Image: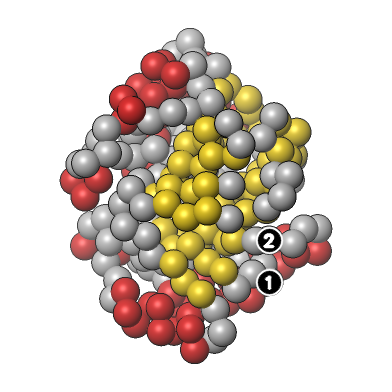
Amino acid sequence: MKITFYGHAALGIQIKDIHILVDPFITGNDKASKIDIDMLKADYILVTHAHQDHILDVEAIAKRTGAIIISNFEIVTHFQNKDLEGHPMNHGGSWDFEFGNLKYVNAIHTSSFPDGSYGGQPGGFIIEGEHKTIYIAGDTALTMDMKLIPMQTKLDLAILPIGDNFTMGIDDAILASDFVECDKILGYHFDTFGYIEINHEEAKRKFFDKGKDLMLLEIGERIEL
């Protein structure tokens, strides 16, 4: 499993020959200007919620690639009305896709489209591939529901928002990693704009002091599990 950070909360995940994009907000992010969305591969696009900083490039990429959009019922319906293909889910549900089992889990946040219309309830995803399992928290506060995750699966990586103000900050993300029982964390949803700028060294030190590994990737940087 290869994971590429495209800035903010945008990720690329490659599982064998399958390409998955998560929350593609790229063309609106000045920090990600070197990323050309017309060069991105996508068989599936996962969307955690309807805010513009998570859906901005979904339509353009899905039209070009024919990717299947996976999200809550309201978001998928929104894009199906634009003649795009989608697979609707809701909290607690799971489905076996060609890349593995995908579960849609709770997140505490809001969800509305840029025009203010209802975007369903926000969520996160657990991807259980053939060899590795990851948790993509989406935009969320710390929640006790996270404790349910290790009761059902063992995570190899937790992808957690760490920018504070709109989501969890560093201290709550450390607790979240305790709740999901995963000490390998990829931080995201930070630095894009002033409200969520963080001190990288302080963040890494706080995780390290708790015996955890916090990875903060440069935009375009990739890790492999």
Q: Residue lying farthest right?
A: 152
Where residue 28 appears, as percent x and y from the top left, is 24, 39
User: Quick check: 219 above or below 94?
Assistant: below
Q: Amino acid at mark 2?
A: Leu
Q: Residues within 10 Å of mark 2 (few under 14, many from 20)?
A: many
How many residues crowd around disc 1 within 10 Å: few (fewer than 14), some, or many (20 or more)?
Answer: many
Q: In this view of the protein, can residue 106 be seen by the observer?
A: no
Q: Which residue is mark 2?
A: 155
Q: In percent of the image, x 68 and y 52: which residue is there?
A: 132
Name above or below for residue 156 compared with residue 221: below
Q: Could you tell me which secondary element the residue under label 2 belongs to?
A: loop
The image position of residue 105, as x and y in percent, is: 66, 49
Rendered view: 73 above or below 195: above
Q: Residue at x 31, y 52 (%)?
A: 219
In 3D space, how far apart are the residues under numbered discs 1 and 2 (Cα atoms)? 7 Å
Residue 142: quarter of image: bottom right
Which residue is located at x 53 percent, y 26 percent? 43
Q: Position of residue 180 (x, y in %)?
A: 67, 67
For the C terminus, give its image quadrant.
bottom right
Mark 1 or mark 2: name the one nearer the start of the chain. 2
SS at mark 1 in the image = loop
Quickly name the residue at label 1.
Answer: 181
Q: Is residue 122 visible?
A: yes
Horizontal and vertical percent for residue 216?
Answer: 38, 65
Cβ atoms under marks 1 and 2 closer than 8 Å: yes
- Near-viewer residue (87 or 44): 44
Give the left or right position of residue 103, taking residue 33 as reference: right
Numbered badge on residue 102: none
Task: Name the amino acid, label 1.
Answer: Glu
Locate residue 187: give its quadrant: bottom left
Compared across the picture, whether 53 is left or right of 102 comes to left
